[in-house]
Amino acid sequence: MFSEFIQNPVHLMSFLVLFPFFSAMLLAWMKGSFWQSWIVRWSSLLLMLTSLLLAFQTSWRPHLFFILPHLHWITTLGDLIITLFLFWIFLKKGTRKELWILSLLIFQTIILLYTDWVLGLKTTPFPFYLDSFSIIMILIIGVIGGLICIYAIPYMKTYHNHHPHLPDHRRRFFFLFFLFLSAMTGIVISNDLSWLLLFWEITTLCCFLLIGYADDAEARKNAFLALGYNLIGSLGIVITLWILAEMHQKPSLTHIISLGKLGAILGLLAAALLALAGLAKSAQLPFSSWLTGAMVAPTPVSALLHSSTMVNAGVFLILKLAPIFHAHIALGESLSFIGGITFLISSIIALNQSNIKRMLAYSTISNLGLIVACAGIGTPEAIWAAIFLIIFHAIAKALLFQTVGTVEHQIGSRDIETMDGLWIRHRGLTLALILGTLGMFLVPFGMLISKWACLQTFIHSSPILALLLVFGSAPTLFFWSKWMGKLISPPSTPSEITLDSSLVSKDTWFSIGMLMILTLVACFLFPAISHFWVDPYLGLTMSSLGPWTLHHPLFLWVTLILLLILPAGFFFLAPSYKTVTPYLCGLNIPATTSNAQFQGSLGQIHTVQIRNYYLTSYFKEKSLLKIGQVLGIIFLLIMILINFHHWKLSTPFLPPPVWNSNSPSWLHLGMVALLFFISAPILGALLTGFDRIVTARIQNRYGPPLLQPFYDILKLWNKQTSVVNPMQIFYVWGFVLFMLLTGFIFFSGESLLLVIFSMMLGSLFLTLAAFSTPSPYSHLGAERELIQMMAYEPLLLLTALGMDLSTGSFQIQTIATSHYPLLYQLPGFFLGFLMLLTIKLRKSPFDLSTSHHGHQELVKGLTTEFSGSLLALIEIGHWYENIILLGILCLFILHWPWEILLTVLTFLFIFEILIDNTYARFTWEKTLQTAWIVAALFGGSNLLFLFYYHSINVRP
Amino acid sequence: MGKQTIIPFGPQHPVLPEPIHLDLVLEDEQVLQAIPRIGFVHRGLEKLAEKKDFQDMVYVGERICGICSFIHSVAFCQAMESILGIEVPERAQSLRGFWSELSRIHSHWLWMGLLADSFGFENLFMQTWKLRESLLDLVEATAGGRVIYGSCKIGGVRRDISLELITQAQTTLKALYTQHQILASIFENDTSIQHRTQGKGMLSKDKAYELGAVGPTLRASGWPLDARLLKYGTYQNLEFQPVVETQGDCYARMRVRIREVDQSFDLINQLLKKLPDGPVETKITGMPSGEHFERVEQPRGEVVHYLKGNGSKFLERYRVRTPTFANLPALVEILKGCTFADVPIIVLSIDPCISCTER
Amino acid sequence: MNFLKKSPWILHYDASSCNGCDIEVLACLTPIYDVERLGIINTGNPKHADILLITGAINAQNQSVVQTLYEQMPAPKVVVAIGACALSGGIFSQCYNLHQGVDSTIPVDIYVPGCAARPEAIIDGVLQAVACFNQKQTIRSNQKRTSHGIKLDSHH
């Protein structure tokens, strides 16, 4: 009996819907916090196990439908109950300002009743289905949702201790949590739109009540906002139902998809309307403000909304419809643009946020934007990327929100600025935060893998989206890194140093620990996830498979392993060092060594305080949001109205990138690695020596000998190494190691994108090294370095995209063996890359963060606090970096004879030196502006030209 | 937003050739507050007047600052000569004018180089200082020192220059003038320099007057005020108009100094053409008794030397009000609201001489 | 081989100089003298520097600054006092605010006289300081050998 139960996916699935519902009822009924915790804990565990079981049961079966007759009346009844309930709440709590929500509610109910009773909805024979995408969603809901429930037990206890004035509605809270999970599971398995609508409305309702949990004016306002926007969304579903009923069509998703694929107006319109519902639910522009408003709710609610439920429902629905968007480019493109614009604008806005929860919220919105953009493109690769985005995002965001919530309870603030020195104050939580952050934007981790796939997809289907993605990821890098910098920097005052870690309960650690493990495991296992769940889904819907290039994650794993063993290496191999005070222009107060204090102008003692950059003078949240909303509304209208017009747009999709499967032998790889390891520093040093001589000659000086850089390095290596914080050593080694790895990847002919991501990881280590000191000048240097990275990242990514468009592959091996110099096709990218080279070689006018010239307002910026062997290592790391960059530069002109190639390279290098000597240093605003304009203008126009040129040539 | 960045800027800082300290309060890179602190170079040399013979004090006066050194000694000597009632020979006055203007050119070139360095234009720094070296050679040939001339004394100057040297000087100066024009055009027309200086550190005409700014800082805000208009010494025989700019930003202050170099070349030309013959010093008689208040134009603006003698060989009181001291209130004013990257440029734009200020 | 000889990096601090020696130190970097041909770089940062050039005498305000800068420089390090004031207070030695020469505060290895010291003299002083390193390096490596495996830092 039992074994039969667990072997039948139908039973398991029904259990997953009904069991949380049952738990919810139980929780609503039970009193006493012991039983409450007990039920929550064990129900969550059971939920997690069942969803895992279901996942393994069905991983080989692509598609299942369920018959469920005679229960259709439940949907109508449920909808009516929800409407009446909302009506009642509105009368009790609503204000005049929220009247539009009431009218929306009434309007929606009227249509629904008309559809149901007057027109009479056709019933779907198979109201539920289960495919591997649903399974993935069920896993996310079950496992991550369950973990969040467990996390919520101690959190809510502390929450009520911190807010004694609030009435304790924990029973209601947990009831809503489980109801939410039940409804979410319902959404991902509904085929019939009326069932979908019922579950959809339940999630809206739960979300509304949870946001309004504190029941003060602010909470109420934001809860109503969320309700209003989501009702606009569900209006989309209601109207779809109505139209389908008018046209006597079955209200099932599969039917709509098949209609849409054929290009029937009805199908397209339904897809657009359902997409509207999805957009509102996943807080895309112009609806984004409800999600940022939802931050007033207790943190488990945010975690739930952002990772496993609510917003995921929106993107899930949109992604379901992806085959339609794929077939109908106009509809798909306008949807993608909404996603793309949301991605760009909200990641820029996230720069401004000092409230960590708001920053996380904008990051969620931007990532959901990316998923929507992928769905709009709708190619198998895009869907692959989108599904992985959902998975990795859910894990990382749940981890981040939970940890942030715990930290907030510990330090009593959610302001990023109060989190300095968290690494010293609370190791465990900081580790969780750092892992979550790494998971969001760095190379071996999930989000970046998905972004990588996105880039590969976008460049072959929509160049403008690729541009939006490229520009949107740059701010992402900035705001995550600076937050990480804050976490690892030493605390500003010693009194803050200790936090009581015993206050973090076991439930919290369980939940956070599980998520940390999941973050790592997901990175190792993503090929398996792809093979067992994502590829079957793609095979089913698109009769295709995911991107091939990512099935060989050798270097990803190498990166991950390096990241994991680096700390261990640090503890065993740390060199001897001396701890000194940070550089404070000589004004240090002698007594203090651990933190930085100096004698101020008026005789008082100042402790050095360093506030992160928020770039509020340059990017302004309000105006950006306004622009985003206007653009969002415009594209929304286009998306709906465009279906009435029969545009026969042919699809300009280019063939997917070529994967060169003859992987090089280990021996070959080893040789390359060794060669790079030895020759790159020598070459880099000679180049630097040459640079210094040419510079001296330009300046009418004689200059140092050619071998001077060697002397400098050897001298530094033999000097005493003094540090302010021993962690500096770790980060510097990280920088050098990842630059080395980048070189291996490059010279073994792997993907150019991987080279770029790995290089970014290396550069990040350098900024972290600067952040880990309490020195103001190295902090400002690090912030400026991040601004520089933000400035040049689009240029770097565009270069890779351009090479791919020209040669049809990201593989350096393929690029290097192209039949013509890429320069002929990529002049714009080439110019952009030269600009990037100027920034990376730290040449004036872009030597913002650290400069070869002694005199700079930041002293030495990034490298201020490094001496002896560490400084030597940084310099060597830069040489590796320079050689890689010159290698990429070579790719442009590789086809020329070597003597011409060398001449051109020398000429270009001298040209860079000349630039260095004929410009005053720019401000960071001007640097960012120049780099982005160059990227958009030269890179963008070249990209568009190339894309359309190729799409004309490809078409028969 | 509660938290702000608080960092020390100076006394040891690579962009500051001299120690001054600023407490900078920043938000991003916006400077919200800049509180200066001085005193790192204070020696208390005015008090030395009570211990050193008034004739020896010329050396101390010259070492108030190594950049405006010669003009300090001129101011001291002129004040002393007024107290003692000594008439300085005309040739000596002209030679003082000659060296004063040379030192002004040297100071402005030095400043232009430092400015270029402060906005990261290393090449321009090198070129400007290379030019300055040629000028220093001329100074060494005529006065005997590179930065501390030591050629001014009470009652005249310590050494005369030969006709041959004068002709040589004229040729050298002609060549330097041409090279200065090339440099000037780079400073004035380079877009990246304009980007860093235009609109930065605005000092309005009223504020400049109200805060008591002097010298190029004042003239760049539209005031045609110059202590040389008092026609002391040789300036009574020379024709010139103060260089005035109206914008009041760093660019304007830079332009004023660049044009003042032109003006100094012109003044030296005039002066060497009608260099009178005669002795270069007169004998000092008596002990100083009484007080005098001497105003002289330095490269950085008007300097005031106040001397009070009591009939002994030690002065009773010696007091110097230096131009940078007068310009500091203006500096604090223009630093507000600038960005961190502009701090060095704005600080330099008043051409601070901390050694003068703190004595 | 001792590479300190080939790449001495300097930190210049103006203690209470009249600027005369300071601008001569700066002039050493410029085309006529061009100390970079000897591998010398003006770092402006104590943590990168090998040689501390001090101009001017020590006064009450800057004494702690000079001390801090000296302490922050990694070993081996050499101090060069430049100009009459840095040597003994020079013409200002009688001033009430001065603690006389630099050696009143930190150990000085090389003294460069002059008022103002000429660039040639300053360069010569730096090169003599470089020669000093040989001795210091030997002392340091001896120390290193005796304290091998023990972190140099007592604070840690």
Image (cartoon, coloured by chain):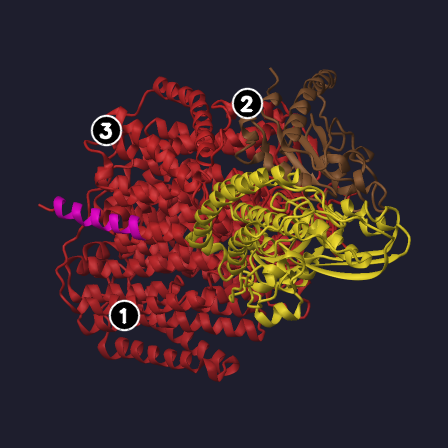
Q: Is residue A150 visible?
A: no
Which quarter of the figure is the C terminus of chain A placed in? top left
Q: Is residue A939 magenta?
A: yes
Q: Is residue A523 magenta?
A: no
Q: Chain of mark 2?
A: A
Question: Quick check: A904 above or below A258?
Answer: above
Do discs 3 and 1 belong to a common subunit? yes
Query: In the picture, which chain is brown?
Result: C
Residue A184 position in % (x across, y down) = 41, 59
Which quarter of the figure is the N terminus of chain A placed in? top left
Residue C37 position in % (x across, y down) = 53, 27
Residue B274 is marked as: none
Residue A711 is marked as: 2
Of residue A937 and residue B292, the one placed in the foreground of this image is B292
Q: Quadrant of the rendered structure where residue A3 is?
A: top left
Q: Earlier in the sequence, mark 2 or mark 1?
A: 1
Residue A637 is marked as: 1
The structure residue drawn at horizontal position 55% and vertical position 31%, both measured from the top left corner, is C34
Residue A896 is marked as: 3
Q: Dot 2 surroundings within 10 Å: few (below 14), some, or many (20 or more)?
A: many
Image hue for chain B: yellow
Q: Tell us which disc is closer to us: 2 or 3.
A: 2
The three-letter amino acid code for the residue at tag 3 is Trp
Q: Secondary structure at mark 3?
A: loop
Q: Secondary structure at mark 2?
A: helix
Query: In the picture, which chain is red?
Result: A
Q: Check the image and name the residue furthest to the left.
A: A956
Q: Quadrant of the rendered structure where residue B319 is?
A: bottom right
Q: Which residues are magenta?
A: A937-954
Q: Secondary structure at mark 1?
A: helix
